[in-house]
Image (cartoon, grey):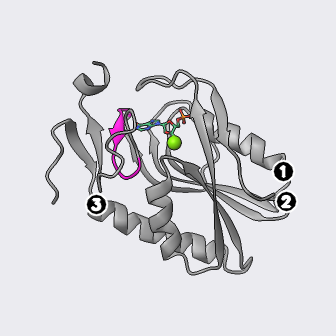
Amino acid sequence: MAKLHKDLQRLLISEEAIQGRVQEIAEEISRDYDEIGSLYIIGILKGAFIFLADLARELSIPHVVDFMAVSSYGKTASSSGEVRLVMDLREPITDKHVLVVEDIVDSGQTLNYLLKTLSGRKPASLKTCALVRKERESLDIQLDYLGFTIPDVWVVGYGLDFADTYRTLPYIAELKKTVYSA
Ligand code: IMP
Ligand code: MG
């Protein structure tokens, strides 16, 4: 197992566990879209780029990958602000079978904003996939594919960052509180 980075409190999801789960989700998606025969994947930047790269390469159905970038106003390690669209899709999604791929769902604000925006463009179908969601009491969100549920702590690695750092760690781990509350 890879040695834990010094800023990390504890390992939550190992590289092996992530790879195994990504494979399972890819198989599930491939089965579900087999009859439809096409899939328009929207990766949400920056966080989803590593998950999406691994997931898409395991799919056995034809698919197209596009990206959107969003950011939250006043985002800190403990609260999320208002969502803002930073980069839009290249193509219209009208009549396409769309799957939104997110890294992590925390308050659900980002995904709800994306679902509202994208459903207005009249896709043939609209589903969601997240690698990780945080355990929260009242989270009202449509998640069609989910990798893992984790405790409500700040995590980094496998695309997830704090201040744009730690994204390329191969595992997901809890960041030490002394790092993000400093
Ligand atoms: P939400 O809008 O509160 O669901 O937050 C979703 C976005 O906040 C994600 O797409 C991430 O970019 C970011 N985020 C939330 N929690 C974490 C975390 O623990 N580590 C890294 N990024 C996070
Ligand atoms: Mg994100």
Q: Which residue is mark 2?
A: 94
Q: Secondary structure at mark 2?
A: loop
Of 76 and 131, the residue lying toward us = 76
Q: Which residues are magenta?
A: 152-159
The yes-or-no answer for disc 3 within 8 Å of ligand 1 is no
Of 151 and 104, the residue lying toward us = 104
In the displayed structure image, the side of residue 84 where residue 129 appears, left or right:
left
In the displayed structure image, the side of residue 159 where residue 12 appears, left or right:
left
Q: Which residue is mark 1?
A: 121
Q: Please state which amino acid type lies under the numbered disc 3.
A: Glu
Is tag 2's residue or tag 1's residue first in the polypeptide sequence? 2
Residue 6 pos. (x, y %): 15, 39
Q: Secondary structure at mark 3?
A: helix
Q: Residues within 10 Å of mark 1 (few under 14, many from 20)?
A: few
Of 32 and 2, the residue lying toward us = 2
Q: Which residue is found at the position 58% from the left and 49% from the top?
A: 44
In the displayed structure image, the side of residue 33 where residue 135 appears, left or right:
left
Is tag 3's residue or tag 1's residue first in the polypeptide sequence? 3
Checking the image for residue 3, the label placed there is: none
In the displayed structure image, the side of residue 119 where residue 101 appears, left or right:
left
Mark 2–mark 1 contact, CB under 8 Å? yes
Q: Which residue is mark 3?
A: 15
Q: Which residue is found at the position 54% from the left and 75% from the top?
A: 59
- Locate the N terminus by quadrant: bottom left
Q: Residues within 10 Å of mark 3 (few under 14, many from 20)?
A: some
Predominant SS along the magenta part = loop
Q: Please state which amino acid type lies under the numbered disc 2.
A: Thr
Q: Give the label, 2 or 3, closer to the camera.
A: 2
The yes-or-no answer for disc 1 within 8 Å of ligand 1 is no
Q: CA distance from mark 3 to mark 1?
A: 37 Å
